[in-house]
Amino acid sequence: MGAAYLFYHSFQVGYFSSDPIFKSGEIVMKNNIRIERAVKNITQAELAEQVGVSRQTINTIESNKYVPSTVLALKIARVFGKPVEEIFLLEDGD
């Protein structure tokens, strides 16, 4: 039975380089948060409040610039009433 690992990177808040945060060989996850928010009709700020983070954190996750911790991913999935695998998706080949 294999183990799954989620990695996240620290970054300077308020500064976003045009260079991708993820380097070759790192795990990249996509997500459906924007779609799920639209279905539930909630803003980034409302989702952020429900899971205990800033709106900017939700924005960077939605933009695939930040991979959330396992705990945060589970909290987000709980808000939408779905399994975490329906919200967060590994890129093909990962």
Image (cartoon, rainbow, N blue to C red):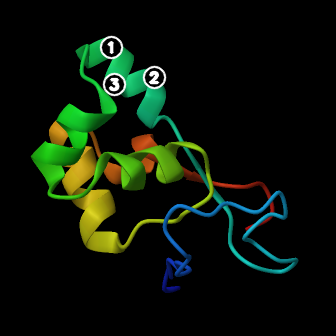
Quarter in which the C terminus is drawn? bottom right
Q: Is the Cβ of the residue at disc 2 closer than 8 Å to that at disc 3?
A: yes
The crowding category of the residue bearing disc 2, from other C-alpha atoms within 10 Å (few below 14, some 14 to 19, many at least 20), is few
The crowding category of the residue bearing disc 1, from other C-alpha atoms within 10 Å (few below 14, some 14 to 19, many at least 20), is few
Q: Is the Cβ of the residue at disc 1 closer than 8 Å to that at disc 3?
A: yes
Q: Amino acid at mark 2?
A: Ile
Question: Visible in this render: residue 46?
Answer: yes
Q: CA distance from mark 2 to mark 3?
A: 5 Å
- Residue behind mark 1: 39
- Residue behind mark 3: 37
Q: Is the Cβ of the residue at disc 2 closer than 8 Å to that at disc 1?
A: yes
Q: CA distance from mark 2 to mark 1?
A: 6 Å
Q: Residue at x 14, y 45 (%)?
A: 49
The vertical placement of 3 against 32, above or below, is: below
Q: Residue furthest front?
A: 14
Query: Is label 3 in a helix, a strand or a loop?
Result: helix
Q: Amino acid at mark 1?
A: Val
Would you identify the image quadrant in which residue 81 lies?
top left
Would you identify the image quadrant in which residue 93 lies?
bottom right
